[in-house]
Image: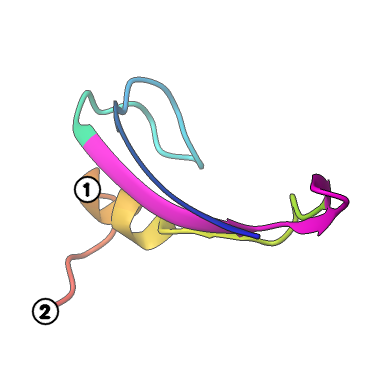
Amino acid sequence: MVTRFRFAATHQREFIGVAGTGKAVALTGMWIHRLEQGRIVEGRQWGQWDALGFLQQVDAAPQLA
């Protein structure tokens, strides 16, 4: 099973080493889960989210052209 997500928040506290900025951010990502009999039995480690996008939104990484 694949779950795609998007959420919006205000960056108020340190996150991945970047001090809170008070800026609005929106993140997207995806998790892949393995199911057995309709229940998630594995998958927390199979995820990806847009860390570069977050860093760009809080001015901690350069914008790409």
Q: Is residue 14 left or right of residue 53?
A: right
Instruction: Please name whichever residue, 52 or 7, is drawn nearer the observer in this view of the structure.
Output: 7
What residue appears at the point 74 percent right and 50 percent down from the top-left corner? Answer: 44
Q: Is residue 3 left or right of residue 11?
A: right
Percent of width and height locating residue 10:
27, 25
Q: Is residue 9 left or right of residue 39?
A: left
Instruction: Please name whichever residue, 2 or 31, is drawn nearer the observer in this view of the structure.
Output: 2
Look at the image and tell me in which quarter the C terminus lies. Answer: bottom left
**Main secondary structure found in the magenta portion:** strand
Mark 1 residue type: Gln
Question: What span is in magenta?
Answer: 25-41
What residue appears at the point 45 percent right and 28 percent down from the top-left corner? Answer: 14
Q: CA distance from mark 2 to mark 1?
A: 14 Å
Mark 2 residue type: Ala
Percent of width and height locating residue 15:
47, 34
Q: Which mark is residue 57?
A: 1
Percent of width and height locating residue 8:
29, 34
Instruction: Please name whichever residue, 11 or 31, is drawn nearer the observer in this view of the structure.
Output: 31
Q: Which element type, helix, strand or loop, lies under badge 1?
A: helix
Judging by the rendered image, the residue that carries numbered circle 2 is 65
Look at the image and tell me in which quarter the N terminus lies. Answer: bottom right
Instruction: Please name whichever residue, 22 or 26, is drawn nearer the observer in this view of the structure.
Output: 26
